Amino acid sequence: MKAFGKNLRRIRKQKSLTQAELAHGCGVAQSLVGHYETGTIEKPSWKFIVAAAKLMEVSIAELTGEPTYEEIQQTLKTKTTNETQLDYINTPFTPSDIRCAYRTGTIQDKQRIESAIYTLFSGKKSKIDETLKWLRE
């Protein structure tokens, strides 16, 4: 999440906030904000991400540099099935991201995710079954 520090600094400056003001509003030490911005600490806490996004009035996706659900949907609409499968495999989505997309997406989205799982776990039936069961719970 190296983009996080750069995004944090850029957005903080756009909002005319100092590190101290951001830190105070998020309930952390100013030095922690500095560490996030310089990349000394690359993985911020979820609590900090949420607080910073709320304070600076931006989406979590914008702050973290992650694609929004809408951006993912647009990408899926413009790619072939094979390209989409490779994207699912090569993009560092968290399991929760994939599960959310599976649960809230269209039938085509579900089919694409299932297809990517079959490709990823080719020949490992128990892993495929376990993953699909988890998605559908």
Image (tube, rainbow, N blue to C red):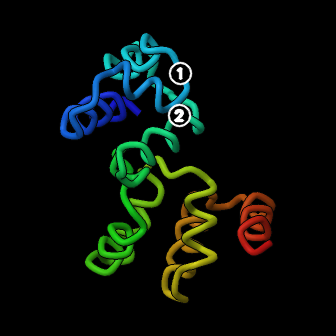
Q: How many marks?
A: 2
Q: Nearer the viewer, residue 60 or 13?
A: 13
Q: Residue at x 80, y 72 (%)?
A: 137
Q: Residue at x 52, y 86 (%)?
A: 106
Q: Residue at x 37, y 19 (%)?
A: 20
Q: Quadrant of residue 27?
A: top right
Q: Quadrant of residue 8?
A: top left
Q: Amino acid at mark 1?
A: Val
Q: Position of residue 19 (x, y in %)?
A: 33, 21
Q: Residue at x 73, y 69 (%)?
A: 132
Q: Quadrant of residue 136?
A: bottom right
Secondary structure at numbered mark 2: helix
Comes first in the chain, label 2 or label 1: 1
Q: Which mark is residue 48?
A: 2
Q: Position of residue 93 (x, y in %)?
A: 50, 52
Q: Nearer the viewer, residue 53 or 100?
A: 53
Q: Which mark is residue 28?
A: 1
Q: Is there CB contact under 8 Å for labels 2 and 1? A: yes
Q: Position of residue 68 (x, y in %)?
A: 38, 62
Callout 2: 10 Å neighbours few (<14), some, many (20+)?
some
**Disc 2 or disc 1, which is closer to the eye?**
1
User: Measured along the vertical axis of the image, is residue 22 above or below residue 83?
Assistant: above
User: Measured along the vertical axis of the image, is residue 126 above or below residue 56?
Assistant: below
Q: Amino acid at mark 2?
A: Phe
As drawn, is 64 to the left or to the right of 112? left
Q: Nearer the viewer, residue 117 or 68?
A: 68
